[in-house]
Amino acid sequence: MNFKNYIQEGIIVPPKIKIKTNDITSLNKQFKGYSDPEIKFEWDTGTHGEYIPALDQIIIYVDDTATPDIIEVILQHEIIHSVQDKKSGMRMALDIQKQQQEITNLSSYVDDLDDDEEIDVDLLQKIMSLKKKLQNKMEFLNHEEEMTYSFMYAKMYKNLGFKKAMKQLQDEWLEWTDKKPTNRMLKYFAMYWQLKDQL
């Protein structure tokens, strides 16, 4: 793969962050002064994160099995989202809210169908398929997520070498989304790969 074919779009490079622990108290102390956006750590089952545009806040949920490397890459993923949202004039947040509302509406419709004794199974399957498609679009299949996941793959798999890291991205993305990575996502990955030692 030729990098020159992919370097056509800009990427957002998050600040380099070093996490040394998964202790929530220590993490909150480390990021106490960080305010653009505010960063908080909370305990939860399963390590994940979220950017909350209305509060200009990132919350990273950490469990006992979380390694510092995983916490670090999830935090940087969410920092990229915060920059994306600001660069979009907060349209990214509005798009996510709209998609969440569509998913909620479909869930409510399915709940109403469950109360009906004569459920149209074909209709129910179509609605559930649409709901899955909308969730995939919101969680993975959009420009913003393609960029953040490309960053994560470049950072997490930089020791594998370019070809193996790219294969890992392609295989896992297909497994998660039932879609191959777009050319745009591959561009993002190639651009982050060139900066992998700075991430």
Image (spheres, rainbow, N blue to C red):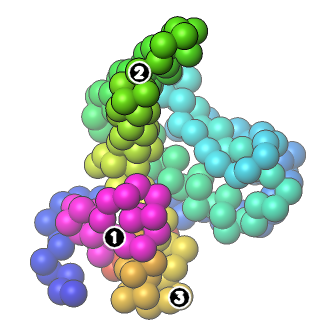
Query: Depth check: 27 or 71 in front?
Result: 71
Q: What is the three-letter code of the residue carrying label 2?
A: Asp
Give the residue furthest to the front: 118
Q: Secondary structure at mark 1?
A: helix
Q: Earlier in the sequence, mark 2 or mark 3?
A: 2
Residue 129 visible in rendering:
yes
Residue hosting label 1: 189
Give the mark count: 3
Q: Secondary structure at mark 3?
A: helix
Q: At 59% across and 55% down in the image, what residue appears?
A: 74
Residue 114, percent across and down? 56, 15
Q: Earlier in the sequence, mark 1 or mark 3?
A: 3
Residue hosting label 2: 120
Residue hosting label 3: 159
Q: CA–CA distance between discs 1 and 3?
A: 15 Å
Image-quadrant location for residue 7: bottom left
Q: Quadrant of the N terminus?
A: bottom left
- Labels 1 and 3 touching (C-beta < 8 A): no
Q: Is 12 colored magenta in this rendering?
A: no
Q: CA–CA distance between discs 1 and 2?
A: 43 Å
Q: Give the magenta part as a residue range.
A: 170-190
Residue 59, percent across and down? 65, 38
Q: Secondary structure at mark 2?
A: loop
Q: Earlier in the sequence, mark 1 or mark 2?
A: 2
